[in-house]
Amino acid sequence: MKIEVLYFASLREAVGRGREQLELPPDVVTAAALRAHLRARGGAWTDALAEGRTLRVAVDQAMAADDAPLRDGAEVAFFPPVTGG
């Protein structure tokens, strides 16, 4: 499955890129599995996508839960929570 991953705000700065296209292994089928797959790269990826770190995820421009399924051609965005006021 091939997807596009977008990184926003502090995540983009931490990993040094705003987007990338990935060919995923067969066992990476949810947003949480993608996050774990990216975290396994090590270094900045481990810290930026750390398991305890609060991050938001969107799949095809809709907010999604960690168990959201991925499909071929999906766009997955990771970003920190936004505060305002």
Image: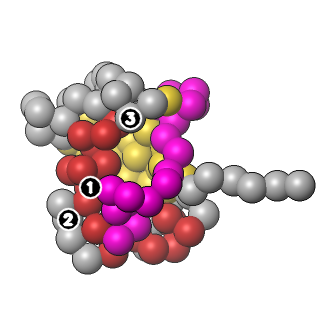
- The tag earlier along the polypeptide, 2 or 3, is 2
- Residue that sits furthest to the right in the current view: 85
Residue lying at 49% horizontally and 29% vertically, measured from the top left: 64
- Colour mode of the rendering: secondary structure
Q: Mark 1 points at which residue?
A: 38
* Quadrant location of the N terminus in the rendered image: top left
- Residue that sits furthest to the left in the current view: 26
Mark 3 neighbour density, 10 Å: few (under 14) some (14–19) many (20 or more): some
Mark 2 neighbour density, 10 Å: few (under 14) some (14–19) many (20 or more): few
Of residues 17 and 58, the one nearer the viewer is 58
In the rendered structure, the answer to whether residue 56 lies left or right of residue 66 reads right
- The answer to whether the residue labelled 2 contacts the one labelled 1, judged by CB atoms less than 8 Å apart, is yes
- Amino acid of disc 3: Asp
- The answer to whether the residue labelled 2 contacts the one labelled 3, judged by CB atoms less than 8 Å apart, is no
Please tell me whether residue 4 is drawn above or below residue 59 in the rendered image. below
Q: Name the residue under label 2.
A: 41
Q: Distance between the residues labelled 2 and 3?
A: 19 Å
* Quadrant location of the C terminus in the rendered image: bottom right
- Amino acid of disc 2: Arg
Callout 3: SS: loop
**Between tags 1 and 3, which lies in front?**
3
Please tell me whether residue 22 is drawn above or below residue 83 in the rendered image. above
Q: Mark 3 points at which residue?
A: 66
